[in-house]
Amino acid sequence: MHLSLVVPCYNEVENVAAFQEAVISAFQGCGYGYEIVFVDDGSSDGTLQELHRLYSAQACPVSVVSFSRNFGKESGLYAGLEHARGDYISLIDADLQQRPELVRQMVEILDTQPEYDIVAAYQDKRGDGKVLTFFKEGFYRTINRLSSVKLRPDASDFRTFRRKVADSILSLPEYHRFSKGIFAWVGYNTCFIPYTACERAAGTTKWSFKKLFRYAIDGIIGFSTAPLRLATYTGLLAAVASLVYLVIVVLQKLIRGIDVPGYATIIVLILFLGGLQLFCLGLIGEYVGKIFEQSKQRPVYLAKEVLLHEDNAPPESSAGQ
Ligand code: UDP
Ligand code: MG
């Protein structure tokens, strides 16, 4: 098998068949074998039945992994990578925002340019609103400053890579998977090519602002410990400021004879320092929470069913780590 397309699907009943057709027409006459590994991420809208239909028809080699509930796109990608058997592996969404024709071009680049191990698509035009763009830029600036991995702001998960890259990604056992960070962390020579995201074929995006915000925080916490240092620095700053204030108070007493400082000052300082302490505690709590979850060693996903097409040998285990 030359190429595996890993496709996470969550409530994409109207898109999966159209996606497969688009793949078949894009790869007509390509001269190599390819498979589609659909991962049903606990959909509630009949996506799984539709995938069963595509699996039975086998219009092209199709495998289906279905989760016992919704585990999120990151877990879907992980499961797909585990079950993909191609020499090249491509991550692509089911909603046809990312065109399979571009995957064919990515494969050509990998075939003809051995110096590259990954071909990643970046969005040359983003259709996000002003507010979202502001937050996204802020996120990339923050994570690139705080973390040793450097993320390209416009790069997406839409990419094709060699098997060794897939093996490297699978070798990272973390429970909280932040793909953008993981891709940057594993390294390898990456060729970036531009693409314009099309409109969603059907359905709506699964990302609310709240989900994106949580994802951004998880990304920063997963790839940097710099926020923990914040407590040390602000603590030091507060200590120095209090010493300076002490000197001022003593001088005021000696020179002008004032010895009862303002009530307002005390209240403001108590509230400010109390707030700061709670903020730092919360920050530490975020990290402790992550350690707690990782220490339970729960699998990244649970599969209730794995249907593999004939050329795809059964894997050793149906659950991630
Ligand atoms: N997806 C998933 N699990 C989720 C959310 C999304 O597998 O919990 C899939 C979804 O079906 C799609 C891809 O991830 O194939 C990208 O999702 P979406 O199109 O909603 O994101 P956007 O393109 O808006 O960033
Ligand atoms: Mg989409």
Image (cartoon, grey):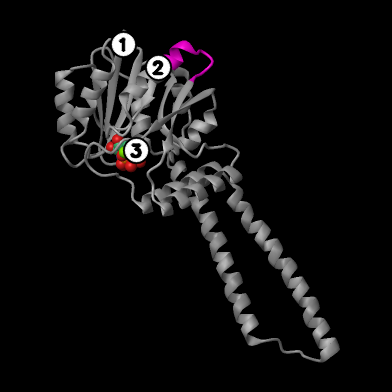
Q: Amino acid at mark 3?
A: Lys
Snapshot quadrant of residue 57:
top left
Snapshot quadrant of residue 87:
top left
How far apart are the two marked residues, 3 and 2, measured between alpha carbons? 23 Å
Q: Badge 3 is on which residue?
A: 73
Q: Position of residue 102 (x, y in %)?
A: 36, 23
Q: Is residue 118 magenta?
A: no
- Give the residue furthest to the bottom: 257
Q: Badge 2 is on which residue?
A: 107
The mark closer to the camera, 1 or 3, is 1
Mark 2, residues whose alpha carbon is within 10 Å: few (<14), some, or many (≥20)?
Answer: many
Nearest to the observer: residue 196 or residue 206: 196
Determine the residue positioned at 45% across, 39% down.
178
Task: Tell me whether circle 1 and circle 3 mark residues in contact (CB < 8 Å).
Answer: no
Mark 2 or 1 closer to N-term?
1
Q: Amino acid at mark 1?
A: Cys
Q: Is 153 displayed left or right of 147 in the figure?
A: left
How far apart are the two marked residues, 2 and 1, measured between alpha carbons? 10 Å
- Rendered view: 30 above or below 146: above
Q: Secondary structure at mark 1?
A: loop
How far apart are the two marked residues, 1 and 3, measured between alpha carbons? 29 Å
Determine the residue positioned at 59% across, 72% down.
272
Snapshot quadrant of residue 67:
top left
Q: Secondary structure at mark 3?
A: helix
Q: Position of residue 73 (x, y in %)?
A: 34, 38
- Rendered view: 21 above or below 207: above
Q: Position of residue 33 (x, y in %)?
A: 30, 11
Nearest to the observer: residue 308 or residue 77: 77
Q: Give the magenta range.
A: 107-117
Q: Badge 1 is on which residue?
A: 30
- Rendered view: 69 above or below 250: above
Quarter the N terminus occupies: top left
